[in-house]
Image: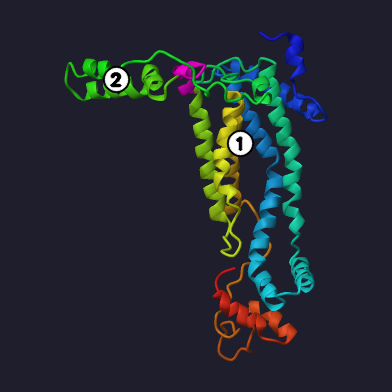
């Protein structure tokens, strides 16, 4: 075992330490209260509870970010019209776009600042959980997980050996597929066939035979520990899919390709940390997705810029008989400038929704 000095040496310190230590004390308090209430696996649930609490406290910042993004989305058709009219004149484009944002009380930076403000909070929470593992608070299990401090530790993770528990494989006890099949087919029935399949491909001996070795912690524990990273990866894919459905895609500017692989990267990162931190990854992903659905689909975010539907005919909006001719919103800019470039751009765009 490591000495107290060794443990103290690898704790996360620095200027985040004040907040991280406060989070760690909160984790211990929540865990104690849950345990006193008779709730099993109290420390694992305290991680979920603290993650939920932090996400709730930062919800106003997330709301401000989402509202800014949705307001900017509502103005995109006008922005495109400006770019079409002043194509090649970046200075004029920037001037007109900024004026458009000011007229609609939209601040593009408002979407970035809340995100930046939440980063130190979640770094502190991550470090609090890391320190909890180092300080020995994650020694209890969580349902099927043998211990929240396994399958690796922070010292191994920092040394670049976070996945040493699963790879490379080491020699282990194997089983002969022929012998297993012979034993299982001595009697008949689906149950025996399933038994043979398990023995040859899913049992610790079968997996050792199939892969030519076993993880350092053995297949039995490895299978249990692999469940959370798989759940983290699936949750990230679902979250990415949900967020993508909320954001109109510009065919001229597709999102960076790396975003498609981000869930796999986060899944790999989760293999490198103790299970307690994997619970944080999973909880944070689930709560983030739920918040985005609430804000974007259930009316949680207030959009101040009205989304207008632009007409495809030559710049005229529908009007009742006898009313004066009214320019469609997308053509107002062209009327101000005295040319029809924006009208042409609007028709080229197809006159769709903003």
Residue at x-position 79% and y-position 30%: 16
From the viewer's side, name the closer residue of 230 and 40: 230
- Residue most toward the right? 15
Q: Position of residue 191 (x, y in %)?
A: 23, 22
Pointer 2: residues within 10 angstroms few (<14), some, or many (20+)? some
From the viewer's side, name the closer residue of 308 and 130: 130
Q: Position of residue 156 (x, y in %)?
A: 65, 21
In which quadrant is the C terminus drawn?
bottom right
From the viewer's side, name the closer residue of 111 and 54: 111
Task: Report which quarter residue 290 is drawn in.
Answer: top right
The span picked out in magenta is: 214-224
Against 206, residue 298 (above or below) is below
Against 284, residue 128 (above or below) is above
Residue 231 seen by the camera: yes
Alpha carbons under labels 1 and 2: distance apart: 43 Å
- State left or right for residue 339 relative to residue 225: right
- Residue most toward the bottom? 322
Q: What kind of element bears circle 2?
A: helix
The main secondary structure of the magenta stretch is helix
Q: Position of residue 30 (x, y in %)?
A: 66, 22
Against 27, residue 63 (above or below) is below
Task: Report which quarter residue 101 is drawn in.
Answer: bottom right
- N-terminal-most mark, 1 or 2: 2
Residue at x-position 58% and y-position 51%: 257
- Do residues under tags 1 and 2 come within 8 Å of each other at their CB atoms? no
Q: Which mark is residue 186?
A: none
Against 304, residue 44 (above or below) is above
Residue at x-position 62% and y-position 18%: 138
Q: Which mark is residue 177?
A: 2
Q: Which mark is residue 284?
A: 1
């Amino acid at each position: 075992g490591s000495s107290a000095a060794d443990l103290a040496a690898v704790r996360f310190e620095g200027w985040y330490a004040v907040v991280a230590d406060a989070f760690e004390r909160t984790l211990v308090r929540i865990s104690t209260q849950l345990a006193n209430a008779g709730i099993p696996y109290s420390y694992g649930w305290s991680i979920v509870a603290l993650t939920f609490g932090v996400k709730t406290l930062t919800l106003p910042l997330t709301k401000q970010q989402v509202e800014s993004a949705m307001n900017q989305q509502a103005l995109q058709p006008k922005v495109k019209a400006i770019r079409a009219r002043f194509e090649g004149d970046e200075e004029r484009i920037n001037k007109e776009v900024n004026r458009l944002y000011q007229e609609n009380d939209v601040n593009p930076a408002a979407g970035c600042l809340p995100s930046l403000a939440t980063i130190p909070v979640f770094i502190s929470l991550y470090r609090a959980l890391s320190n909890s593992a180092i300080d020995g608070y994650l020694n209890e299990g969580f349902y099927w997980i043998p211990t929240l401090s396994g399958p690796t530790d922070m010292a191994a993770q920092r040394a670049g050996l976070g996945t040493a528990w699963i790879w490379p494989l080491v020699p282990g006890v194997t089983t002969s597929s022929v012998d297993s099949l012979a034993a299982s087919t001595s009697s008949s029935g689906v149950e025996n066939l399933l038994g043979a399949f398990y023995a040859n491909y899913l049992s610790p001996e079968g997996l050792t035979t199939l892969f030519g070795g076993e993880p350092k912690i053995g297949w039995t524990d490895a299978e249990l520990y692999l469940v959370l990273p798989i759940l983290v990866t699936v949750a990230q894919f679902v979250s990415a899919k949900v967020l993508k459905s909320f954001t109109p895609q510009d065919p001229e500017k597709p999102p960076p390709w790396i975003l498609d692989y981000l869930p796999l990267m986060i899944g790999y990162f989760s293999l490198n940390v103790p299970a307690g931190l994997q619970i944080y990854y999973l909880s944070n992903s689930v709560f983030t997705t739920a918040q985005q659905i609430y804000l974007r689909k259930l009316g949680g975010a207030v959009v101040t810029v009205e989304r207008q539907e632009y007409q495809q005919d030559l710049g005229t909006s529908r009007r009742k008989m006898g009313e004066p001719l009214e320019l469609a919103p997308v053509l107002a800019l062209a009327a101000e400038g005295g040319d029809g470039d924006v009208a042409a751009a609007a028709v080229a765009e197809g006159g769709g929704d903003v």
